[in-house]
Amino acid sequence: MPRQLLIALVVLATAPCCQGQEARPELKQRGLSGNPVFAGWYADPEAIIFGDRYWIFPTYSDRYHKQTFFDAFSSTDLVNWTKHPRVLDADNVDWASYAVWAPSIIAANDKYYLLFGANDIQNDEALGGIGVAVADKPEGPYKDAIGRPLIDRFHNGAQPIDQFVFRDDDGQLYLYYGGWRHCNVARLAPDLLSLQQFPNGETFKEITPENYVEGPFVFKRGGRYYMMWSEGGWTGPDYSVAYAIGDSPTGPFKRVAKILKQDPKVATGAGHHSVVHPPGSDDWYIVYHRRPLGETDGNHRVVCIDRMEFNDDGTIRPVKITFEGVERRPLE
């Protein structure tokens, strides 16, 4: 057998995944999620816990005008995932046509609210922005809640995309969002269908940290607020995740460090993430997308999970991206 052919066969036999397929079955048999955790081209995953199940809501990663719907995935243990197809479809949103991106999900008012970006608007005259859809179950189906975008303009230079909803301990809901290297925070009304002003009269407060590009995410640990975001270009090798720590949900946020990036031995372009944390534990997982080795199509991204750990001073340790993923972790 020619040496080149032998090398090619060895690579194919040992590769953990290809063409957006989930990791090798033997990893799941060993109680590991494997990476990617489910099959298909997906990006911008938001992970959350509802009851006894983990959920992931990602962007469908395809050509621009084929991004017209969301699938969702649920699991009881982080290892075995069930697909819930087309929980939201642009056909059910009169003003949304394409570029349906970066869903953010939250439970409130005995319903589930899915915030999403659509149409990738480039100026204030274009139709699109951040919308709100609502359903009675996490798996939908979701319907447009207000018949128009919640945010349809550029405020403080922030493109209205990449939305994330954070609920603070006092119940106040905050909406973080922004592309084009600007990040805003706004206060959501209790019905999640409108915005409230801050005490100083502002509606959109800019909180852009150093090197911010897109994809904000916020969580609270040890009484402090962690703001995370993506840096670099989404199709390039420099795509990555950094974070800051603040004393309030509106900052100020000073960049601490980069904690997620590609490993040329594992995958490229690791970024646009979320974090999931089983209650009552100190287990933290980072859910993110990356591009398989050798993949050159910018839209070919897959969803992965790895552990996120902290130092004694509360800083986040650099994340090691893996083929193995994480161990089975049922919710108690």
Image (tube, helix red, strand yellow):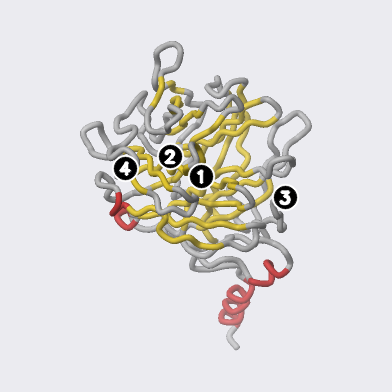
In the image, what residue occupies the spot 44% across and 33% down? 177
| Residue 305: image location, x then y, percent | 62, 53
Residue of label 2: 162
Q: CA distance from mark 1 to mark 2?
A: 9 Å
- Looking at the image, residue 82 lies above or below residue 212: below
Q: Residues within 10 Å of mark 1 (few under 14, many from 20)?
A: many
The answer to which of marks 1 and 3 sits earlier in the sequence is: 1
SS class of the residue under badge 2? loop
Nearer the observer: mark 2 or 3; the answer is 3
The answer to which of marks 3 and 4 sits earlier in the sequence is: 4
Quarter of the rendering containing residue 178: top left
The answer to which of marks 1 and 2 sits earlier in the sequence is: 2
Task: Tell me which amino acid carries mark 1.
Answer: His
Q: CA distance from mark 1 to mark 3?
A: 28 Å
| Residue 115: image location, x then y, percent | 42, 41
In the image, what residue occupies the spot 47% across and 43% down? 111
Residue of label 1: 272
Task: Tell me which amino acid carries mark 4.
Answer: Asp
The answer to which of marks 1 and 4 sits earlier in the sequence is: 4
Q: Are marks 1 and 2 in contact (CB under 8 Å)?
A: yes
| Residue 29: image location, x then y, percent | 71, 70
Task: Tell me which amino acid carries mark 2.
Answer: Asp
Q: Residue furthest left?
A: 125
Q: CA distance from mark 3 to mark 4?
A: 40 Å
Residue of label 4: 120
Residue of label 3: 332
Quarter of the rendering containing residue 204: top left
Q: Residue furthest front?
A: 110
In the image, what residue occupies the spot 43% across and 39% down? 162
State the residue in front, 151 or 49: 49
SS class of the residue under badge 1? strand
Q: Are marks 2 and 3 in contact (CB under 8 Å)?
A: no
